[in-house]
Structures are given as structure tokens and as C-alpha cells.
Image: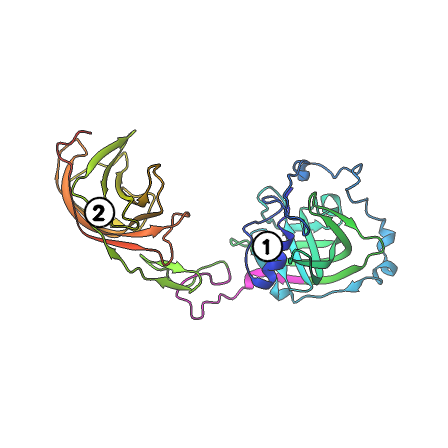
């Protein structure tokens, strides 16, 4: 199993940046003293009991007699403002900075959360490597030689009960927890937790939580994240939301013209028109700029006006503009239509041959196939084509 980066959650609590990972089921963890990643060769530990012959596996927990009131009185009580427990990712929740608490759910490969009552001190939950429901507390921030933040003390559950009364559609949870945690070290190559000999212990008395009580924060925001997993405003229409400015970004478009020659190309059942920017005017004028107007296999050309809408997938008439395309077909920037019209004046029935004109706006897209906030834009005001009597 794979643990979410320990350093990531520490940094996230202080600089509020995400690390692109999610859980021990999805990403390798990182040893605070090393950046090497290693594979987990033990398979999915959720299918088997921890191997007690492995020296790295946590010993069997002590008898109930070891957790009697005399022993418990040696533990330090610790409390958090449980109203501040918030979903940090789909399958784990955090409170606080120093100390900080993290509640993970690793019940299956997707790390989804299910309602139920869970014993934190039995079976798979006895060790961080194999836990399905995992409770950790970190104390005392330090800075290691690599300039990364670390915690001087780590605590992991030894016993206790976690109750999840309900899980809503957004993955927020309501329930309670009471637990005893003992000081451990965690091998972030194998994800194994090992009790610290003579280490400290903490107690959490019964605490109630409800992460679904988040209050959206959209003050001064036209768009963007509301802090509760939703979006502010009603979207940006044909524009994009700039996450840093929390505002819809207007595009300042440059004029662009295309060559008169438009050719029909075919690939399998798909047809498309191909032409190039006049004078290679987009970007570097020493490299060609190619426009493709694609038609899906069900498209049947007819005379009339076609309205173009924002989108790079699922469109019947899809434009893809490659700025500064080299001899290997690689481009510097990619654009697609934002708005506009294509007017088919004449169509050769039963073929993809046509003649017409149009106008449209091309906006820059990023690798995630969405408009690039603050990206470039081209305005094409007088586009003409005539593919009649051209060979397919």
C-alpha cells in the first residue's frame, strides 16, 4: 500500500499547497530524509493479516490489562477544535497545525469512506502499513537538513473506536472518535509503524465531528473554489477562471488571416479541412501555423449556418489550431474555437466538399483540455474556403 506524502501534508498545513497525491492507495510516500520512491512489494495488505514473522511488523498489542485506568492515567490528554476538521482530500481529513491530526480512510483501493463503527486497535488497524482507518497526531515542527519541515513526534492509534454515522454525497462525514495513541516511528519506505520504546502516549476523549458544516467563502470572488469543494459564482461563460485572481479572464484577441487554399483530408471515417495561417503570422513567423476543422463520422454537410461553441471535445465541428508547428508535427501552443459561425453556402451532396465563409475566435488551451487562464486569443473575421471538386 502507498502512503500520501508525509512532507506534503506538513507543508500543506502551512503554505496551503497541494502535492498532487492522495493516499497510500495511490501514491508512494516520501521518506523525510530521502527523495527516492520505492515500490510496495507486499501487495494489497488489506487482503491478508500483517505477517507477524516480519521484523518490521508491529508486535501484537498488549492485553486489556495493559490499557487499564492505571496505564491510561500516564497518557496526556489532547484536544482539538473538532469543528475545524476538514476534508483535505477525498479520503482523509485534517485538523490543526502543531499539533496536527490526520484521519485517513483506506478501506479499499479507491480509499472511499463508508459509514460504520471501527475498532482502531485490532486487525489491520494495528499498524499504519495495513490500517483501513488510520488516526495520527504530529507534534513539534522541526526543519531537517534538506530544508523540509518535519515533526519531532508522531503518534499512531493503539486502541479506540471510530464511528462514522453518515457520509454525504460530497464525501463529508459525521460521527465520533475516542482513542489512545502511542508514539511511533514510521518507515516511509515500507509504511510500517513501530512503537518508540519508553515513548509517550496521548488520549482523545470522545469527540464529535461533522465536516459537512463547511461555510463557503466566496467573498470578493467572481469564480473559483469556495473552500468547501464547490465553485463560486455562475462560471465564466466563454472565458476562463484565473485561480490566482479568482476572476474571469478576458481575452485580448489578435487578428489572424488564413491562406485561400483549404484541402480535404481523411483519416479512417473522419474528414477534416486543413489550411495554414497567412504568412505564418501566429507566433514565430519561421514556423507554420496549421488550422484543422474536423468533422465526426456522423456529420453530414448541409447548406446553412453552423454556430460554434466553446469546447475541444464532443463537438460536431471541431477546430484545432497549432501555433509554430515544427517538422515533427509538434506545436508550441494549441487553440480551439471559443465562438463563431461557419456558413456553408454550397455543398456537394454525398461528399465532404463545400464552399463557404465564416468568422470565429480561437482561444489557447492547456494540457488539461481547458482554456488557459490569461492565454492568447486570435480573432478570425473573414475566413473563406472552397473544397468543391477537390480529391478526397
Q: Which quarter of the rendering shows the C terminus? A: top left
Which residue in the rendered view is the most extreme toward the bottom? 220
- Horizontal relation, residue 85 to residue 259: left or right: right
Which residue in the rendered view is the most extreme toward the front? 286
* Residue 294 image offset from top left, x and y in percent: 27, 39
Q: Return the residue at label 2.
A: 279
Q: CA distance from mark 2 to mark 1?
A: 63 Å
Which quadrant of the figure has residue 237?
bottom left
Give 257 or 309, whichever is nearer the viewer.
257
Q: How is the image coloured?
A: rainbow
Task: Give the prevailing secondary structure in the magenta stretch.
Answer: loop
Q: Which mark is residue 378?
A: none
Segment tinted magenta in the rendering? 208-228
Q: Secondary structure at mark 1?
A: strand
- Horizontal relation, residue 380 to residue 106: left or right: left
Which quadrant of the figure has residue 208?
bottom right
Badge nearest the viewer, 2 or 1:
2
Crowding around mark 2 (Cα neighbors within 10 Å: few <14, some 14 to 19, many 20+) is: some
Q: With respect to residue 267, does 325 lie above or below?
A: below
Reply yes or no: does residue 218 show up in magenta.
yes
* Residue 39 image offset from top left, x and y in percent: 64, 39
| Residue at figure coordinates x 78%, y 45% from the top left | 58
* Residue 240 image offset from top left, x and y in percent: 36, 57
Which quadrant of the figure has residue 290?
top left
Q: With respect to residue 235, does 112 lie above or below?
A: above
- Mark yes or no: residue 156 visible: yes
Reply yes or no: does residue 250 show up in magenta.
no
Q: With respect to residue 169, does 217 lie above or below?
A: below
Q: In the rendered structure, which disc, 2 or 1, sits on the residue that comes first in sequence?
A: 1
Q: Secondary structure at mark 2?
A: helix
Q: Which mark is residue 166?
A: 1
Amino acid at each position: 500500500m502507498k502512503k500520501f506524502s508525509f512532507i506534503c501534508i506538513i507543508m500543506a498545513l502551512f503554505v496551503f499547497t497541494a502535492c498532487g497525491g492522495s493516499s497510500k492507495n495511490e501514491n508512494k510516500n516520501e521518506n523525510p530524509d530521502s527523495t527516492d520512491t520505492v515500490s510496495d512489494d507486499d501487495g494489497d495488505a488489506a487482503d491478508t493479516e500483517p505477517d507477524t514473522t516480519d521484523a518490521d511488523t508491529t508486535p501484537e498489542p498488549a492485553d486489556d490489562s495493559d490499557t487499564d485506568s492505571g496505564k491510561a492515567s500516564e497518557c496526556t490528554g489532547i484536544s482539538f477544535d473538532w469543528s475545524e476538521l476538514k476534508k483535505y482530500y477525498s479520503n482523509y481529513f485534517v485538523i490543526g497545525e502543531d499539533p496536527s491530526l490526520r484521519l485517513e480512510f483506506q478501506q479499499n483501493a479507491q480509499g472511499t469512506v463508508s459509514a460504520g463503527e471501527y475498532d482502531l486497535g485490532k486487525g489491520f488497524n494495528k499498524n499504519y502499513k495495513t490500517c483501513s482507518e488510520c488516526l495520527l497526531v504530529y507534534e513539534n515542527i522541526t526543519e531537517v537538513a534538506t530544508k523540509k519541515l518535519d515533526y519531532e513526534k508522531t503518534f499512531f492509534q493503539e486502541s479506540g473506536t471510530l464511528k462514522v454515522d453518515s457520509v454525504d454525497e460530497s464525501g463529508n462525514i459525521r460521527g465520533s472518535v475516542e482513542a489512545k495513541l502511542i508514539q511511533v516511528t514510521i518507515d516511509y519506505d515500507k509504511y510500517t509503524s513501530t512503537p518508540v520504546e519508553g515513548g509517550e502516549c496521548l488520549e482523545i476523549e470522545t469527540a464529535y465531528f461533522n465536516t459537512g458544516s463547511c461555510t463557503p467563502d466566496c467573498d470578493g470572488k467572481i469564480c473559483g473554489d469556495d473552500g468547501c469543494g464547490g465553485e463560486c459564482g455562475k462560471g465564466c461563460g466563454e472565458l476562463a477562471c484565473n485561480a490566482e485572481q479568482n476572476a474571469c479572464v478576458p481575452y485580448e484577441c489578435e487578428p489572424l488571416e488564413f491562406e485561400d487554399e483549404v484541402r480535404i483530408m481523411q483519416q479512417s471515417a473522419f474528414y477534416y479541412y486543413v489550411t495554414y495561417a497567412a504568412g505564418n503570422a501566429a507566433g514565430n513567423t519561421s514556423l507554420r501555423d496549421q488550422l484543422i476543422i474536423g468533422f465526426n463520422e456522423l456529420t453530414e454537410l448541409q447548406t446553412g449556418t453552423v454556430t460554434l461553441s466553446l469546447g475541444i471535445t464532443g463537438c460536431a465541428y471541431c477546430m484545432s489550431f497549432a501555433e509554430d508547428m515544427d517538422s515533427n508535427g509538434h506545436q508550441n501552443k494549441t487553440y480551439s474555437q471559443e465562438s463563431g459561425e461557419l456558413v456553408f453556402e454550397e455543398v456537394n451532396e454525398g461528399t465532404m466538399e463545400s464552399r463557404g465563409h465564416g468568422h470565429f475566435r480561437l482561444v489557447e488551451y492547456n494540457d488539461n483540455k481547458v482554456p488557459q487562464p490569461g492565454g492568447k486569443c486570435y480573432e478570425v473575421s473573414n475566413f473563406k474556403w472552397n473544397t468543391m471538386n477537390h480529391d478526397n
